[in-house]
Image (spheres, grey):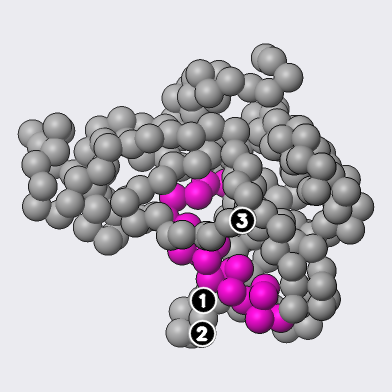
Amino acid sequence: MHLLPTKEEIVRILLETGALRYGHFQYPSGLRSNQYLQLPLAMRYYQYAKLFAVGISRLLRADPEIRALIPELSLVTPTVAGLPVAYSLCEALRAHQVYWAESDESGLPIHFRQYVEPKRGEAVLMVDDILRSGRKFLDLRNLLISQGASVVGVAVVIYEPSPETADLGELPLFYLAKLEAKYYGEHEPAEAETIPPEEVWI
């Protein structure tokens, strides 16, 4: 491996672990794609989780503004699914703390657990495994700002934009690899049209 793993090396890991699959997949929104990524299948293995975290930490340390904030930096993830990345990255960076937001079946918008909240002016890096639609990041950013935090960037292992990806403004985005899938509308012919689409959760 290089100082930073290459996109080819990361894709090889994703394919070997079954985290990256090719075929015909349909998201809950109706959007269809020729590939599907479920990064927890790769994060199950400590050596890969560590590889990803160390790689992202090197990208962050190369940014002088982020590097200066690391001793007091909070890593916050929009879902509990992002915790393996957040904790691994916190260890690699030696950042200040990790916490997360939740959305549940109560109908409440994204929120923090009772007594968990950012301090006013707290520097926060939003972290997750994948940036696909970006909607959860958008909700988390709005929640953090409403409580007085300063959001300084977004860090993910994989950036996989879609036609539905939300605009996060001028926030710096750090990622190890960008995967560009092909997307098809609900009634648009797909290359794998002969294969019935497999429904995926997220």
Dividing the image into 4 quarters, which one contains the N terminus?
A: top right
Nearest to N terminus: mark 3 or mark 2: 2
Badge nearest the viewer, 2 or 1: 2
Horizontal and vertical percent for residue 199? Answer: 26, 51
- Would you say 158 lies left or right of 89 here? left
Image position of 162 with respect to 16: above or below: below
Amino acid type, label 3: Leu
Q: Which residues are magenta?
A: 129-147
Q: Is residue 31 above or below residue 150?
A: above
Between label 3 and label 2, give the one nearer the viewer.
3
The reply to whether dot 2 and dot 1 touch (C-beta < 8 Å) is yes
Residue 189 visible in the shown view: yes
Residue drawn at x 10%, y 47% as measured from the top left = 188
The dot on residue 104 is 1
Residue 141: % across, % down: 61, 68
Pointer 3 residue: 171
**Left of 161 or right of it: where is 194?**
left
What's the distance in space between the residues labelled 3 and 2, CA to CA? 26 Å
Q: Say if the magenta span includes residue 48.
A: no
Residue that numbered label 2 is attached to: 108
Kind of element beneath mark 2:
loop
Look at discs 1 and 3 and give the one toward the viewer.
3
